[in-house]
């Protein structure tokens, strides 16, 4: 892919289902809605991947409730799911999914029938808590500065290979809020992430994508999610880490394109 076009469309407040979230919209076509990871991040980290998909779909990247521009106060897990359910259902995405925490939230909304897309994509869905997620939940760590978190993420990405310039730029634009602000959400999430993945029979095709070198949500976690999701396809990207598109956004986009083409989307 060529270097990212500039300027990008600015995020806008989108009200749907009685809820308002800040959303960056890229491209045109059927709506493809992706939820970002975290807690404490925002949609910007997904922008390089969205740019790869925006020639075929209208990609919507919302900030989760209580994240980024969608509210300054972190919410409980129940509140997050309830608000997302209302908003996402009203937006009626043709393709629905998320990355990391966003993948977990997307699966819950699919499992509870809150959304009814034609296809779903779960990128690096979490399993048993480990890596950065587990470390962030330890109270003795205290707060990391935004700069320290950003440097840590860049270091992790560079361990997987030379970082794509568009990805590095997206990291610079991503909010890194203090882990302790999201302590309540972390505390509610951790027991669920340690538990067995609840099975469900989706009413649409589901693609689960893992990074071979992911240290946050290892391939085993994605395999467990795929095994618990009837008829789900699993794709493990060689050499990729937790931010699958960090080295090559095109490779992750190709996996999604192939899956959607197979399902005539």
Image (cartoon, grey):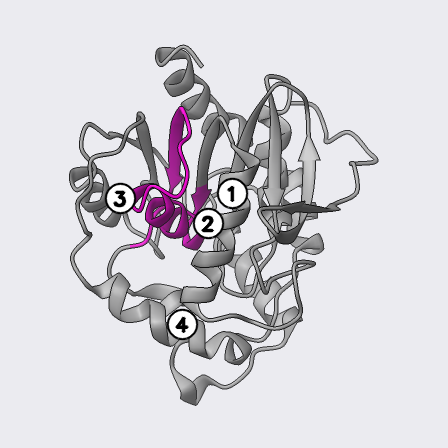
Task: Tell us which disc is closer to us: 3 or 2.
Answer: 2
Task: Tell us which disc is closer to us: 4 or 3.
Answer: 4
Q: Say whether disc 2 or disc 4 marks the residue closer to the N-terminus.
A: 2
Residue in the foreground of this view, choosing between 3 and 201: 201
Residue sitting farthest toward the front: 18
Q: Would you say the residues marked 1 and 2 are in contact, meaning their CB atoms lie under 8 Å apart?
A: yes
Task: Tell us which disc is closer to us: 3 or 1.
Answer: 1
Q: Residue under circle 4?
A: 186
Q: Residues within 10 Å of mark 4 (few under 14, many from 20)?
A: many
Q: Say whether disc 4 or disc 1 marks the residue closer to the N-terminus.
A: 1
Q: Would you say the residues marked 3 and 1 are in contact, meaning their CB atoms lie under 8 Å apart?
A: no
- Whole-number angstrom distance, CA of label 3 to CA of label 2: 23 Å
Badge number at residue 222:
3
Is residue 246 visible in the rendered image? The answer is no
Mark 2 residue element: helix
Which residue is pictured at 19% across the width and 51% down the height?
Answer: 198
Q: Residue under circle 2?
A: 85
Mark 1 residue element: helix
Location of residue 221 in the rendering, given as x and y in whole percent from the top left corner: 24, 49
Q: Would you say the residues marked 3 and 2 are in contact, meaning their CB atoms lie under 8 Å apart?
A: no
Mark 3 residue element: helix
Task: Tell us which disc is closer to us: 2 or 4.
Answer: 2
Badge number at residue 160:
none
Q: Would you say the residues marked 2 and 4 are in contact, meaning their CB atoms lie under 8 Å apart?
A: no
What are the residue bounds of the magenta stretch? 98-126
- Whole-number angstrom distance, CA of label 1 to CA of label 2: 5 Å
Q: Residue under circle 1?
A: 88
Q: Residues within 10 Å of mark 3 (few under 14, many from 20)?
A: many
């Amino acid at each position: 892919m060529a270097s990212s076009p500039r300027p990008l469309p600015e995020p806008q407040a989108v009200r749907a289902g009685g809820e308002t979230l800040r959303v960056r919209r890229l491209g045109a076509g059927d709506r493809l809605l992706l939820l970002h990871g975290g807690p404490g991040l925002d949609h910007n980290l997904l922008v390089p991947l969205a740019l790869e998909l925006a020639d075929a779909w209208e990609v919507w990247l919302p900030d989760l409730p209580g994240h980024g521009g969608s509210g300054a106060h972190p919410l409980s897990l129940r509140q997050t799911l309830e608000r997302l359910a209302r908003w996402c259902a009203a937006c009626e995405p043709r393709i629905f999914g998320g990355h990391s925490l966003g993948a977990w939230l997307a699966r819950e909304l699919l499992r509870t029938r809150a959304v009814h897309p034609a296809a779903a994509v779960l990128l690096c869905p979490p399993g048993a808590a480990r890596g950065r997620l587990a470390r962030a939940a330890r109270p003795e760590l205290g707060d990391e500065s935004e700069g320290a978190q950003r440097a840590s993420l860049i270091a992790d990405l560079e361990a997987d290979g030379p970082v794509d310039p568009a990805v590095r730029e997206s990291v610079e634009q991503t909010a890194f809020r203090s882990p302790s602000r999201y302590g309540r959400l972390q505390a509610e999430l951790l027991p669920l992430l340690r538990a067995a993945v609840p099975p469900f029979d989706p009413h649409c095709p589901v693609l689960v994508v893992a990074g071979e070198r992911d240290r946050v949500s290892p391939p085993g976690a994605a395999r467990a999610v795929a095994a618990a999701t009837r008829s789900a396809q699993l794709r493990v990207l060689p050499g990729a880490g937790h931010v699958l598109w960090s080295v090559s956004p095109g490779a992750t986009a190709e996996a999604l394109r192939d899956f959607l083409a197979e399902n005539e989307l």
